[in-house]
Image (cartoon, rainbow, N blue to C red):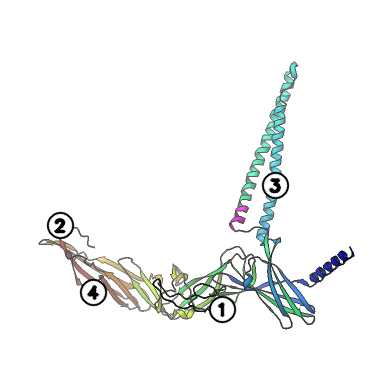
Amino acid sequence: MRRLLMLTVAIVATLTVYAKNEKKVKSKISSVTVYREGAQITRTANVTVGKGKTTLVFDDLTHKINADNIQVKASKGLTILSVTKSIDYLTGKIIDANTKKLEERRIELSDSMVLINGTIDICDDEKDMIYANRSIGGENGVSIEELKRAALFYRTRLTEIETKKYKLNIVKGRIKRDLDKIENHLEQNDTPIDKPVGVVKVVVSADRLVSKKIELRYIVADASWKPDYSIRVNEVSKPVDLYYNAKVKQKTGEDWNNVKLVLSTGNPYASNTKPELDPYNLDFSNYSDRSYSKQSDKYTDKTQTSVEFRIDQRYTITTDDAVRDVSMVKYKIPTSYRYSAVPKLSSSVFLMARIADYTDFNLLSGNAKLFLKDTYQGDTYLDMFTTNDTLSVSLGYDRDIIIKRESIKEYTSKSFAGSYRKDQRAWEITIKSNKKVPVEIDLTDQYPVSRTSDIKVDLTEDGGAVVNKDTGELKWKIKLKPREKKTVVFKYIVKYPKYSNVVVR
């Protein structure tokens, strides 16, 4: 008995010492590096520890922490001995203030629903009791006055009961609609109230009483960003203004309140281990050369470089998966501008921006909004996977340049020559510039091309175009001075058997 008592005392003493050497750390998120997929959270805290070993407990964290990517950094004088991560399923936490309000409202409405249902049940019980006691007077019957009083009571009371039930059911319907909205919102946003919390324990050692700063970093999923551009052109003689922005969202389980943001093009899950080549053996089943990393058994990345954008302004991004716009950087990019027109398909002249050396700006493929002289022109897509040295971007049409394509009726005719029918066509293209600066326009049109020996096409006038006889494409480079107008004309004749049906435009 004495031995058991001593053992119990020893265990209690050990647990007491262990608990005494554990210290909860109050930390806050100071910065976040958001990757295309995933994010690195940096928490900072000031701690005071005594001589010897102390277990620092970072609790109330997201349970989505990747245990393989936890990093801890401490100031000089504090030695880190070990780092462990666990999940607390018992404590639970409410994700954000909005969710807390919704849950409180849900409980309030649910309680009201229970009360209303109970009141309706009481009304039904009372009505059943009235119906069960409708027989009055027994075998001797009742007087007319007694019957009138009984009938009045039944009518009045049953009316009161039905009126009360009607009003209660109206309120019940409203409560149910509100409850459905709240529950649908919580379900769609995957926001259960009591979520498990992550706990990180850091064992540190000090040779004396010290107060130091400690930094905890960890990787979480359910966060991402994608590029979103605004391209603005004021004058074709000036560089293009490219606003490099980002669409950021997160559902990590932690709000990022007033944090420093870094947007990275890197991959947080990339291996830090140098890959090793396996022997490259040939046999008859070889289709391609694939290099594997022994440690990951996945294809190795062709590039190991990434770019980080450090955002000057602090941002608050809550864990609701809603998209937030983040301003990254503005570039003034030297650009050559050209106008392009295909009047057969469109009566507009489009402004094209040609950006050389675009790889210097670390652009990613993404959507872009186009503005010409502060007028929204629409959206386009910047494709960074192009192999061209120059990036071409259509900036929309320019209202200051007018183009018109018309058939020349005097030359348009149909006639017969022996066994052939002959169609003559002529087109006149007029371009007028209302701009105050010279412009150059790439003009494209076409004439028909025969794919059979029975149909013959003769381009009788090309208007000075560069002619592609295989495709029938006609190209002009039209230079216009301020407010100048020019006209080009091209003509062609199509011959085909007169009993054939050929549509010539």
**From mark 2 to mark 1, how far is it between C-alphas?**
76 Å
Q: Percent from the top left, x then y, of residue 496?
A: 16, 62
Q: Mark 1 points at which residue?
A: 273
Q: Percent from the top left, x then y, of residue 43?
A: 67, 73
Badge 4 crowding class, 10 Å Cα cut-off, few under 14, some 14 to 19, many 20 or more, is: some
Give the SS element for disc 3. helix
Tag nearer the camera, 1 or 4: 1
Position of residue 476 in the picture relative to residue 206 (left or right): left
Based on the picture, tell me whether residue 191 belongs to the magenta stretch.
yes
Which image quarter holds the N terminus?
bottom right
Q: Name the residue under label 4.
A: 463
Q: Mark 2 points at which residue?
A: 499
Amino acid under label 4? Gly
Q: Mark 3 points at which residue?
A: 112
Give the SS element for disc 1. loop
Amino acid under label 3? Ser
